[in-house]
Image (cartoon, rainbow, N blue to C red):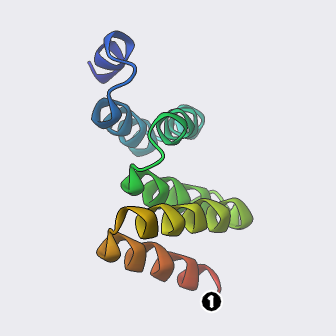
Amino acid sequence: MLEEFVAKNPADAFGRYGLAMECMKTGDNAAAEDNFKQLIGAHSDYVAAYFQYGQMLAKMGRVDDARKTLAQGVSQATKTGEEHARQELQAAIDDLRR
C-alpha cells in the first residue's frame, strides 16, 4: 500500500519515510536505503530520516557511513532549529564511539 502511495506521490516526504521504515522493519535494507537516500535527497530538512537511516547503517555494521549520515542530520537539525532532534542525533554519534 505504501509503495503504491509513493509511486503516485513520489515527492511526499512522509510517505517516502513510511516506506523506508517499513522496508527496514521487514529486513529489506537495500530498499530502505534507497528510500532514505531519495527522501534525504529531495527533503534534506527531514531530520528524522537521518536518525533512522544512521541507526540502520550502524546495525548493518557500516559505522563510518552511520556517523556521516548522523552528522549530516546534526547539521540539518541545527539549520532548522530542531534542538531536540540535534541532541538525539549527537547522542547516536556518541554511542557509536563507545
Residue furthest toward the right?
64
Q: Residue at x 48, y 56 (%)?
A: 50
Q: Which residue is mark 1?
A: 98
Residue extending furthest toward the bottom: 98
Q: Secondary structure at mark 1?
A: loop
Residue 66 percent coordinates (x, y): 63, 63
Give the mark count: 1
Q: Residues within 10 Å of mark 1 (few under 14, many from 20)?
A: few
Q: Position of residue 17 (x, y in %)?
A: 36, 39
Q: Residue at x 53, y 32 (%)?
A: 38
Q: Nearer the viewer, residue 58 or 84?
A: 84
The residue under the point 48% across, 46% down is 44
The correct choice, above or below, for 1 with respect to 48 in the image is: above
Image-based side of 49 in relation to 41, left or right: left
Residue 78 position within the rendered picture, expressed as x and y whole percent measured from the top left: 44, 70
In the rendered structure, the answer to whether residue 62 lies left or right of residue 87 reads right
Question: In the image, what residue type sits under mark 1?
Answer: Arg
What percent of the width, then of the height, locates residue 42? 49, 34
